[in-house]
Amino acid sequence: MTFQEASKHKMTFGKFVGEAVDKVASTDEGLKYLDWLTGNEWFFTRYPKDAPAVTEYLADENIQEELENL
């Protein structure tokens, strides 16, 4: 999955259900939420469609820099 594909992936659960990953990440709250998700093992087992997209998105160098500045 590419960064572009990951950014357009629509979340399938939670308070951001139906929203694209890049839209969720457009706020500090949303970016922190995505980061928090990847720190929880249940996210990877319960949401196998969302986990690769969120992981790929957060792996981007620019996104990592944003997270560091929060």
Image (spheres, grey):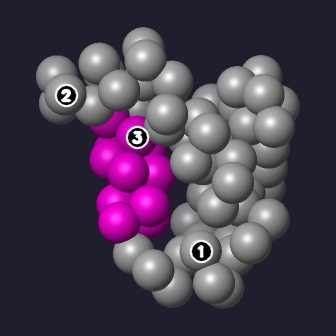
> How far, Cα to Cα, is label 2 from label 3?
11 Å
Residue 68 on image: x %, y %: 19, 28
Q: Which residues are magenta?
A: 28-39
Q: Which residue is mark 1?
A: 44
The answer to whether residue 23 of the structure is visible from this angle is no
Q: Residues within 10 Å of mark 2 (few under 14, many from 20)?
A: few
Query: Which kind of residue does numbered mark 3 sit on?
Result: Leu
Q: Residue furthest top?
A: 62
The answer to whether residue 59 of the structure is visible from this angle is yes
Query: Which kind of residue does numbered mark 2 sit on?
Result: Glu
Residue 50 on image: x %, y %: 71, 61
Q: Where 28 falls versus 13 (above or below)? A: above
Quadrant (top left/top right/bottom left/bottom right) for the N terminus: top right
In the rendered structure, the answer to whether residue 11 lies left or right of residue 29 reads right
Q: Main secondary structure of the magenta part?
A: helix
Q: Earlier in the sequence, mark 3 or mark 1?
A: 3
In the rendered structure, the answer to whether residue 38 lies left or right of residue 48 reads left
Quadrant (top left/top right/bottom left/bottom right) for the C terminus: top left
Q: Which residue is mark 3?
A: 31
> How far, Cα to Cα, is label 2 from label 1?
23 Å
Q: Where 34 falls versus 3 (above or below)? A: below
State the mark number for residue 68: 2
In the rendered structure, the answer to whether residue 70 lies left or right of residue 56 reads left
Q: Residues within 10 Å of mark 3 (few under 14, many from 20)?
A: many
Disc 2, disc 1: CB below 8 Å? no
Name the residue: 78% across, 28% down: 2
In this rendering, which labeled residue sits more in front, label 2 or label 3?
A: 2
